[in-house]
Every structure is written in C-alpha cells, then in structure tokens.
Amino acid sequence: MLLDSFDAILSDLDGVVYAGPFAIEGAVESLNRSVEMGVPVAYVTNNASRSVETVAEHLQQLGVKTDADHVVSSAQAAARMLKEHLEPGDKVLVCGAQALADCLTEAGLTPVFSQQEEPRAVAQGFNPQITWENLAEAAYTLADPEVLWVVSNTDFTIPKERGIAPGNGTLVGAVATATGRTPLVAGKPEAPIFATGAQKLGAVRPVVVGDRLDTDIQGGNRAGMPTALVMTGVDTFESVLAAVSLERPTYILKTLADFFLDYPEITVETSENSASAVLGSLEALAQGDTLTLRGEGAEIDRVRVACAAWWAAHPETETVLAPRELIRE
C-alpha cells in the first residue's frame, strides 16, 4: 500500500483534517490508523497566532491522537530560521502574536517590542490584534539594512466565518512597501516549515499532504519531498489539471484513506506533439490544446490519468495551463 513508501506524514489541517469546526469524514480514523501502523503524523500549519498546544487541543477534541510535539507552526519555523542566522540570546523584534514570541524564547532568542532595544532581526507573523504602531515599529527597525527580516508566511487571505479576510501577506506587504525590502519566508509555500516538521519526527522519507496546490504542494515540492493532494478541500479536478509545474503533486488522493491502498500504476507515452496515459480501462490523450478522456473508471482515476497525460504533454510551465477543449468519450 502507498503508506509503506513513507516513514512520516506532514499533514495540512484545514481541508485535510477538518473543514470549519468539523472533521472531514474518515480523516481522523485514517490519521490515527497511520500512527498505529508506525508512521507518525506531524500537523503543519501556517497559522502563527495560535500556539502548538492550542492546535493540538483542537485536534484532540476532534478525536485525533496527537499532542503539541506533533504540531509544527510557521512561528516555530521562523524561530528556527532566525536561530540559524543569529547568536544565542540575540534580540528579535516581534511583530505578531505571543505565540511567535514564545517560539523565539524556546529557540534561545530574546523577543523585544521596540526598535530602541536594538534588535538584530524582525520576526513578523499574523496577529488579528496587530496595530499600525506594530507595523511602524517593524518598518523603523528594518530601515537598518543589517537587520534580518523573517516572516511566518505570506498568505494574502485567511478564511473566516464571515468570509475571506486579509491574511499575514497583506501585513507583510505593508511593511515591504514602507521599507522597500523583501523578507525571508519560513512557512508554506517555502521549504523551511517542512524541514522543521521532518526534523521533529526524525523522518527521512516523509510525504507532504495537503489540499492546496499553492501552499502545501508547492512547499513540499520545494523541500524535495513527495507530495499528496487530497481532493477534500480547496483544489478541484480543473485546477489540478492546469497546475504549474512546481505545484503538481506526486500523488492524487480522493481521501486520506487512499494511503491504505496500492497507488495505481499509470503508463505514459509521449511523442513530438502528444502524450497518452493509460490506467486500467481508462485512457487520456493530450494533443495540442485538447485533452480526450476515454473509458470507464472511478472519478479519482480519471483525474489521475488525465493529469498524467496533460502534464507529460506540458512538462514545464510557469503559468496555469488548462486544455482549451476537454472531451469525455
């Protein structure tokens, strides 16, 4: 079965484990089963405003057998990155939540909140209570080009109960506009957060699991790890098919339960102007800007064989590229 290929799972949360306040059907059982089979799970989140203890408590309430040691936040990844660049005890200006400051302390650094304390770096993370004064303090500090700037993530939006709200990326953008500087990014879609997760588990063959191409899958690919997209969250057949090269997953799963099945073998053949893929009785043919699907089979297998053919025909693309015509025979 697919799970046998890995020694750990680095799992996203929203869209993989839960949707809003509710667990996704079968997700908790699959994750617990993985742990029982000796493949540990670390939960990787870009949220730098919640402590790992709070995240673990939420997961436990849903029935997930885990603890804070198996949660990896972008705040932790940011602190780890700063630790690699600074000396023990160095001062870091915090532009974010208390959870970020706590991670800095755990990393042996000294969180401060004023430019006057002469910090050697700025750590910026999401905080719903952040003020203009906090952003200004960061900008004043970063006027010194020797001061290092690390941010937890650059997600431009964040889903909330009432809709889509500005995320940490918009706050980072405000500081970047004021300073003309570009930060180092610790969270998804960059690699450091996944390296942190693998290190916590002592894993050498981890798989990154997520529902978003632009954060989870891109980040796992950047980290050089195999990636698995589960079709229980944001991305769809159409968006996966049209994915840029850096955001194409190694595996496409209907749900987390697919880890306990053999992953199907797909035969791919390419020629100068086309590519074909065969999975059982299913066949996909990509010619020019047309993709043709033939045969009967499970919908997830149709997604897999379609992507295999289309991606083989367009192996390198930095822009979203969808077939102009999709024919289902």
Image (tube, rainbow, N blue to C red):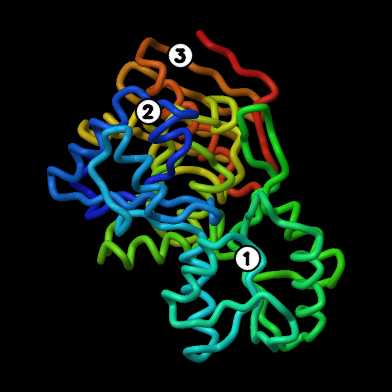
Judge left or right: residue 292 versus residue 158: left
The residue under label 2 is which amino acid type?
Answer: Ala
Mark closest to the chain's N terminus, 3 or 2: 2
Q: Is residue 265 above or below residue 4?
A: above
Q: Are marks 3 and 2 in contact (CB under 8 Å)?
A: no
| Camera sees residue 233 | yes
Judge left or right: residue 222 versus residue 214: left
Q: Nearer the viewer, residue 198 or 251?
A: 198
Q: Residues within 10 Å of mark 3 (few under 14, many from 20)?
A: some
Q: Is residue 99 above or below residue 116?
A: above
Q: Which mark is residue 231?
A: none
User: Which residue is identified by label 2?
Assistant: 23
Judge left or right: residue 273 versus residue 233: right
Number of the front mark, 1 or 3: 1
State how many labels appear: 3
Q: Nearer the viewer, residue 173 or 62?
A: 62
The residue under label 1 is which amino acid type?
Answer: Val
Q: CA distance from mark 1 to mark 3?
A: 47 Å
Q: Which mark is residue 151?
A: 1
Mark 2: secondary structure: strand
- Where residue 85 sits in the image (x, y, percent)? 54, 85
Mark closest to the chain's N terminus, 2 or 1: 2
The residue under label 3 is which amino acid type?
Answer: Arg
The quarter of the displayed image where residue 151 is located: bottom right
User: Which residue is identified by label 3?
Assistant: 294
Q: CA distance from mark 2 to mark 1?
A: 29 Å
